Image (cartoon, rainbow, N blue to C red):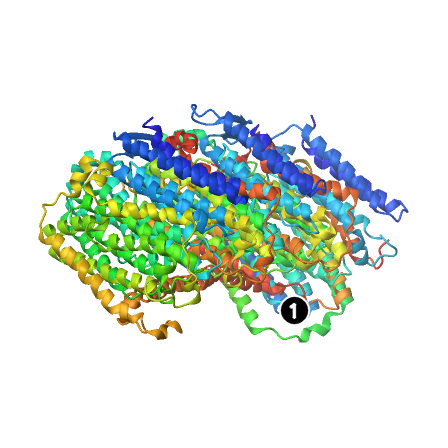
Amino acid sequence: MSPILFWLFTALMLAFGTSVVLNRDPVASALSLVASFLCLSALFVGLDAFFIGVIQILVYAGAVMVLFLFIIMLLDLKAEQRRQFNRLSLAGGGAVAVGFMFELLHVLNSFSIGKNPFPPLGVARLDDVRQVGITLFTQFNLPFQTVGVLVLVASVGVIVLSRRELK
Amino acid sequence: MFPPISLEILVLALGFILLLAESFSNSTNKRGLAHIAIFCLGWIFAISFFTASAPATLAPGSYWNFYSGDGVSLVFKRIALLTTIAVLVLALDYESTLAKLLPSAHKGAGTGEFYILPLFTCTGLMLMASAVDLVMAFAALELVTISFYVLVAYARRSHASLEAGVKYLILGALSTGFIVYGITWIFGLTGETHFTKVAEKLAHLRGDDTAILFAFLLVLVGLGFKVAAVPFQSWVPDVYEGAPTPVTAFLSVGSKAASFLLFLRVLEPFLGVESILPKVLQVLAIVAGATLIFGNLAALPQNSLKRLLAYSSIGHAGYLLTAIACIGAGGSLLLGVGTTVGYYLFAYMLMTLLAFAVLTLVSVNSKGEEIQHFNGLSKRSPFLAFAMVVAMSSLAGVPLTAGFYGKFLVFAQIIQAHQWGLLALGVITVGAGFYYYFRVVAAMYWHDPLETTPITVAPLSKITISLLIASIFYFGINPNPVLSALRTSAPSVAAAAH
Amino acid sequence: MESTLPWLILLSPLASASLILLFAHRSKALSVLLSLSAVFVALGASLLLVKNATDVLTAIPWIDLGPALKLGIGLKVDALTRVMLLVVTGVGTLVHVYSTVYMAEDEGKSRFFGALSLFMFSMLGIVLADNLAMMFIFWELVGVSSFLLIGHWFTKESAAKAANKAFLTNRIGDFGFMSGILLVWSTVGTVEFAGIQENLAKLTANPTFLTLAGLCLFCGAVGKSAQMPLHVWLPDAMEGPTPVSALIHAATMVAAGVYMLARIFFILEPSATALGVIATVGAITALMAALMATQQNDIKRILAYSTLSQLGLMVAGIGVGAWGASMFHLFTHAFFKALLFLGSGAVIHALHHEQDIWKMGGLRKTMPKTFLTFAIGTLALTGMPFLAGFFSKEAILLAAWHKSMPVFAAGLLTSLLTAFYMTRLVVVAFFGHPRTDAASHGHDCPAGMTVPLLILAVLSAIAGYAGFAEAIFGKELFHHVHAAAAVTLVPALAVGAFVLGTVGAWMLYHPAIKDPAIFKDAYRIKDPVRIPLFANKFYIDEIYSALVAGTQDMLAGFLGWFDHFILDGVIVRGICAITWGAGYTLRLLQFGNLQGYAFFFGAGVVVLLYILTK
Amino acid sequence: MNPLTLNHYLLASGLLFSIGFAGVLLRRNIITIFMCLELMLNAANLSLVAFSRYHVGADGLPNYNAQVLVFFIIAVAAAEVAVGLAIIVALYRARQTTHVEDLVSLKF
Amino acid sequence: MLTTLLLIPIVTAAALFLGFGNRTWAKGSALLQLALTLALWFRYNQAKAGYQFVFETNPLFPGVDLRYSVGVDGLSLVMLLLTALVTVTAVWFLPNLEKRANLFDGSVLLISAGATGAFLAKDLFFFYAFHELALVPTFLLIGLWGTGERQAAAWKITIYLGVGSIVLLAGLVDLLMALPVSSRTFDLQALQQLGAAHMIPAAAQIRPWFLLTIGFGILISLFPFHSWAAPAYASAPTPVAMLHSGVLKKFGLYGMVRLVLPFLPDAFHQPVWGSYTAQDLLLVALLGNILYVGLVTISQRKLDFMIGYSSVMHMGYIFLGLASLNLAGLSGACLLMFAHGLSVAALFAVSGTIRDHEGSLRFDRLGGASKSVPFLGICFAMAAFASIGLPGFANFASETMVFFGGFSPGATSFQKTATILALWGVVISAVYMLRAYKAVFLGQPTATSAKWTDLAGSARFALALLPLTLLLGGVFPRYFLGYLKPTLEAALR
């Protein structure tokens, strides 16, 4: 990936990320989130992870984001925008987040491996869906099954939690 | 002999069958489901004694890279099974209360899943116990976490349950974020996800101590959240209080036990890095000390027993973390840290489940979970009062109950490591523990009851409670079965003990 | 035979005491019978022992820890023991007989005789002891039997108080005694008299230590023999029944201190300082007690102070080195003081428990036998020549003359005062006319009481004669009695003091009782001599109670307060409160706000990360 | 312009993580908080993919284990969102609020 | 046989809890316990030192020598006899309850079982465990059936002793840790042999010494950790006060003899503060018990508190015997444990009976009781005289040994001074005991005390058992010392 594109998408991703946090309107936040994730998937693609990039768009933009918007609309959350921020908690939360960020920078700064450029790939054309598939269904079969159960549990849970009347 | 994974498969199959049965049957009585589940889990527990332990392989591409059926995991699987059985028994007792908190079409409606979801949670717990790979660990952990989100918020007519659900959800997701980030860093540092390989790679890394420490901290945060270590404990009291009581019991025993084992497994690779060892141990000691103090002292002024048990659960996490923080000293007095933690959790399971069993029955009959609802319990039901005395004594660490050996092992660990600060905290907190646990005993025996109707105990609950009491005494005198089971196959955790 | 006799002496009263306590306490007659037979057995055995005048030593171990510690119950019968044995069993027998009548109507008669037997056992134990530890054991036991007997009429507040006071005061002395025993033991390694004597060199090697040990041992005697400053219990002990006063608080127990000093004289002898202190204490006690006696109105109290005074004299005798003379005086004193007490008992008995001498009068006529014996006793005590007291007192004075003039002077003055107050007593109580109804109905008591009086009167008369005494003391011991070279001036001065005292008192008091006003109200007549300081016993009781209240009780009260409010209240509860408060504060961190929890979470991450990466 | 290093991506990921974390700490609306949590998870994913690309195996391919893990994380996150939103809906039905300040009945 | 002895009270208690049986069962159990103890007492072979009647299971910890093992030697026999005697008396002084009498009786038996177990145990772990087990019934009984500020007292004793036990636990573990890995064992006999072999270097002894002394000290109410004792005993129901102060408290002292002396003898001579040694420190603490607590006792105005404090004070003498580190002092201390247990139990039995009669134990409300209840008076007098160290009772014999021990050759001058000061305590104890005796039993009878009824029937025998045993011990201390001596010699080696 060319550095220019990297910087562009990174800047956009962070900007939209910030917009998620700063926007008072949940709908705007949700849209910013999607935008941020689109930039993120661009970064994924830049890292030669095409499959993940696609999945990212499909799952987040296609499903999660719709879910969020749907719920926000369902609950009609506008009334709550007017609430005031508590300055103390604002300062405290900000301080913690900023403190964490600086410590993270400190870690990255001392991270020797990270200073290396990416090694070149050994193949000209990456069949990355196939590779992911092979890895997932052979080696990672057990965790995969587990995640399957997890999704089952989640769907059962969602039904139990949201049906108007239980039978 | 069965392979260890058969246990997970059987429980999972049981869960599926019951789920199908629940959706296709027209019966309005869901209690049958629970009875079947309890019965079958009992059999599965029996089968667990006929499984051959099978440590993980490291062959590339093998299915068993992720799963270790070693002796320790077997013990934790049994803990998970027993906990689930007990939770289901509690759930049966809790049914009348739960039914009122559900938007049900008819009596008992919607309780079916309440009996079935624990089976999936149990599967997750068992998988967690066996997970020797970060990916597997993550998947299993999330299976447990997500099923707990549902279970905690299950009683959705209850504001408390919902509030607890939301708090657990947000903070749990936050901790998941940290775990994921931590896994990322571990992978980034080593390029591996299997614990053994990670350990090998980490030990040979040079010059990136800060990054290793960062990865360690992220995992500590994530798992510290699960085991209720200070300062990541804040969800515990609220969620424990709000959740339906059987779920609280499940959270406090099952989730904690599996998380501790995972914590030990994740910790081990970091302990192999000598250059960071002092800092790791220092932070562990700080966290352990803070947890000890917070859990035990904040429990002192509690009036709600459920909340008190929540704080006590933090306190016990403190003892366990203390044992882990003393991991660094050479030569074990009695047994390794892994065995100490394993035994402690086993004892903790017995006594906590007993306490929750009594709490469930009393709260159902007294419409409340405050200590004052236990007033004069010895008159209303001497059996339950006695059970509670046993549970509280064991939690407080009175000898000849299972809880004492746990404390004993922990103190041995502390002294061995010459952690005098932690020893002092331990002494203070045990003293505090005597106070808040015995307050319940005092309420039951000293005070007059708020209401005098006797409490009837269902036969199944009676059997469960009796068995728990008997086990507390039995393992309080002879801990050998548990200890030798923990030690038979020297797993990676036991190696961490040295 | 010789080795079993001492055991018989010792154990027969014990058997009687235990039998009474365990089985016979419901039957008065049986109790009396048991007690009497025990004392007769003891007397008989003692007489047999005197006849076979060989020394006997017999012991059984009591505590035996090998070389670490060996304490035995050992009996030692030598000349000194024999004297005391006879005194104790002799006077004891008479008092037992006397008591059967005196206590006839008492509801606690069994208890009384049980305690009396216990006392005999304890006292004989002291006498027979062959080591300091055993002596201490019986020393304490006589204390407790004295406690029981003083407090015999326990529903009387004053009796109960007196019993406590006696016991406690003795305890203070015993504290010193035990310290002394420990000091000796730590040097010598044994507590047996024989052993100490053998290893005396170890003790004398360190004179300061020796003096300290000697004085500590002397403390025991100060308590038991009621020397200054621990004398306060003895007058109060008169709350007990009169036979008890006669036996315990006149003839035997209080003399145990003197006996003990005589026993351990070989330890005291090398230390001039110790002896000097002993002599001074004795002399002061003798003099002050005599002064106090001159102003008392209670017949028993006068006798009590007199006892104090005489004990002081004996102790002073030890102090001037004349332990033989002191023992001799102890011996004679036992008879005439017991006689006097029993006589006063007869008076009290006849007058229905009237003890004020001013409410008596004229008893000479109504109680002739009692008067006669009482008079003999008085004269023996005051030192009338050729009666017992004269000889023994003179022996002490003689020794003092050689050793220390101040002690001699004090002794002489005491003799004079003794003659004075005893004559005062006799004149006021027995002469003139009865001043109360009770006094006018006085009568001699039954034979059970009079016979012991008569026997004692005879003994008081003859006990001082060399022949009699020597027979009992044995040649060797009697040699010590008259160790000092005779000086003619001493008996002359003694006689002078006697005459002066007697005549002085007669001159003062005989006219006073003639005053007709006293028929109406005894207290209208004024004692011709009135010295409040003496009457109030130098205010020592008051000073003591102020001291006790001011120091011990106040300290105890303060410490009680401290313990309750500071140690337990502030410190212990404070720690609990701090812990609880900390818990309460920590609990406040769980304020329910999800965001706050996330903040703690984050802050925890940041802080831990800082610690890790700094 | 310098070639891109691993740290570039890690930095981007770290900043996104911090932004998400800040959102969790600062926002009052539970749904928004939930979105911020998604940001954090995805930030981790970015690092993971970067590491995957960095740890090129002997066969010259990126380390697909990490990508599979990313796949799992996305799946889990989706499930979590589903359950989480269900809980939030249930909460809203019961309490008519999605604000954290209103959820303080359980405390101390 | 020993396990049977342990099971008698436990099984009876369990039966009572389950609703079977009644007061007679409790009495029968106590008598059976006494009978069995006496059988042990006479069958014990004094000529053979060491543990006898040993029974032990396989190790309970894999690879660690920790097992259920019981056995008795001379010292534990004496303590068992004390337990059995006090239990019999305590059971006869159980109050008449309308409700839940079985709970009360069973709990009392459990306390006795705890003590029995602790003294029987030949294994360090069970030795510790049984003692603490007795805490729970104590807590229940004081809070439920106590008098006065019973709940506060119950809390105080429980928390105090809980903390004490945990310090003790730390000390025990530290002690084991000080041994080389290969010789770590929980077997008391094996431990004793290790102690004799001086396995622990002197400098390493001081820390476990402190932990153990403070731990045991809290359990024994060593100054300044004594403030739980008097209020607890004053509030406790009579049998509980008897058993706890008479028997259970001796556990700590027993532990000192069993563990601290054989193991950490050099610690006593280690300087801890300037030139003052640990022994000096202990002496100061025990003088606190004797003089400070003694004076506090004098200031008490209620009989139960007075006895409670006096029991604290007498712990000082036992410690004095321990601190002397020689056979005389130690034998005195051990015999004094026995004697003090009996005398204080008898005192509490009498004071409890009086409280039942009068409802109050304030000295200014009592008086002249000997008139109406002479038997109680005699028993109280005997026990009181015993406790102030009157010859003839075992207490005197033991105190004598203690004092001689403090003065034996080799005693430091500090020790001798302390002993002399401690001797003054004899005067102090006489002051308060006689005051109490006079206030309650002597003097003019009060309007109520004249109407009291004396003990009758078998309760008389039960109560008389204690002072009579004291007399036996006082006259023939040698008989008891014969049992104690070999054990103690081994402990001092």
Q: How many marks?
A: 1
Q: Is residue A1 visible?
A: no
Question: In terms of depth relative to the viewer, which is nearer, E363 or C542?
Answer: C542
Q: Position of residue C284 (x, y in %)?
A: 21, 59
**Residue at far front of view:** C365
| Mark 1 residue type | Glu
Residue at 52% x, 49% y is E162
Q: Position of residue B453 (x, y in %)?
A: 78, 55
The local crowd at label 1, few if under 14, some if 14 to 19, many if 20 or more residues have their Cα within 10 Å, is some
The residue under label 1 is D101
Q: Position of residue C127 (x, y in %)?
A: 31, 40
Q: Position of residue C489 (x, y in %)?
A: 9, 54
Question: In terms of depth relative to the viewer, which is nearer, E94 or B310?
Answer: E94
Give the image quarter of residue B345.
top right
Quadrant (top left, top right, bottom left, bottom right) of the N terminus of chain B: top right
Question: In terms of depth relative to the viewer, which is nearer, E361 or C437?
Answer: C437
Disc 1: which chain? D
For mark 1, give the secondary structure. Answer: helix
Residue at 32% x, 31% y is C48
Q: Specify whether C225 is left or right of B495.
A: left
Look at the picture and state if B15 lies above or below A68. above
Q: Is residue B30 visible?
A: yes
Q: Specify whether C396 is left or right of E379.
A: left
Look at the picture and state if C608 lies above or below B403. below
Q: Specify whether E452 is left or right of B86.
A: left
